[in-house]
Image (spheres, grey):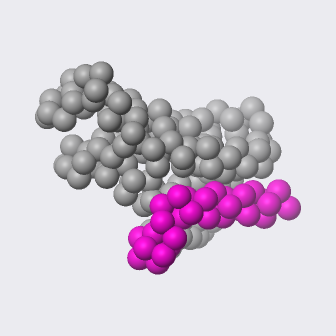
């Protein structure tokens, strides 16, 4: 997944959910469920449509662009839920479930689509050397993207613009992949 999206969305959602351990767990669980779903989806799609990654990447970028305003407005959505008694802030699994479902509903589609990319590419680079290079590039890109987003882009541009830049980076990757 594009680490700059994760960092910018995490900050916006953490503010909306309040900065608690439970909020961190909810956001992390939402992203991990979506990434796992993306891995399953990648395996099945790759068998049926081997060139579908060229379509999934632009769809992922579009999903990031569409989800970003919802992430930015999460505080308003959750405030409305609190007024209706749906998303109260007490610690219990039953109280956390509506917030987990909300976060997954907002970030699930883009994170799932982005979660298809690494397993897809890993399946295409079946050799030990190819997989090792892919893991190295993924690790370096994830660390660099998180640092760039957290320490440079977010303070300078804000969460929305950072997410949009990440979406355009995914579009650029789609153009490179299509060639």
Residue 123, position as x, y percentages in the image: 63, 50
Give the quadrant of the C terminus.
Answer: bottom right
Say which quarter of the image contains residue 169: bottom right
In this rendered view, identify the residue nearer to me: 124 or 169.
169
Main SS category, magenta section: helix
> Which residue does the image show at 64% across and 33% down from the upper left?
44
Question: From where the camera sits, is residue 125 visible?
Answer: no
Q: Is residue 10 above or below residue 70?
A: below
Count up the numbered dots: 0
Task: Specify whether residue 170 is painted magenta.
Answer: yes
Q: Residue at x 58, y 53 (%)?
A: 118
- The picture places residue 72, in percent across and down from the top left corner, at 46, 49
- Asked which quadrant contains residue 42, the reply is top right
Residue 55 placement (x, y as % from top left)? 77, 44
| 5 over 133 or under it: above or below | above
Q: Is residue 100 above or below residue 118?
A: above
Q: Is residue 2 left or right of residue 46?
A: left
User: Observer-nearest residue: 33 or 90?
Assistant: 90
Residue at the farthest left position? 91
Residue 177 falls within the magenta-colored stretch: yes
Question: Is residue 37 rendered to the left or right of residue 26?
Answer: right
Using residue 178 as the reference point, say whether residue 144 is left or right of it.
left
Q: Is residue 18 left or right of residue 7?
A: left
Provide the residue span drawn in magenta: 150-179
Please say if 86 is above or below 155: above
- For the residue pair 72 and 24, the one nearer the viewer reads as 72
Please provide percent x and percent y for residue 168: 68, 61
* Residue in the image at 78% along x and 64% along y: 176
- Residue at 77% over, 36% down: 49
Work out whether residue 105 can be spotted: yes
Q: Residue furthest right?
A: 179
């Amino acid at each position: 997944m594009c680490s700059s999206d994760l960092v910018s969305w995490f900050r916006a959602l953490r503010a909306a959910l309040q900065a608690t351990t439970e909020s961190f767990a909810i956001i992390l669980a939402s992203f991990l469920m979506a990434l796992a779903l993306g891995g399953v989806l990648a395996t099945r799609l790759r068998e049926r449509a081997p060139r579908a990654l060229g379509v999934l990447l632009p769809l992922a970028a579009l999903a990031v662009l569409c989800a970003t305003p919802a992430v930015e407005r999460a505080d308003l959505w959750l405030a409305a839920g609190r007024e209706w008694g749906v998303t109260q802030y007490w610690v219990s699994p039953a109280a956390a479930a509506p917030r987990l479902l909300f976060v997954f509903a907002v970030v699930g589609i883009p994170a799932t689509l982005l979660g298809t990319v690494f397993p897809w590419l890993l399946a295409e680079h079946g050799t030990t050397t190819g997989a090792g290079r892919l893991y190295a590039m993924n690790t370096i890109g994830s660390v660099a993207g998180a640092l760039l987003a957290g320490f440079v882009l977010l303070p300078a541009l804000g969460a929305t613009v950072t997410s949009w830049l990440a979406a355009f980076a995914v579009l650029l990757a789609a153009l490179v992949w299509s060639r």
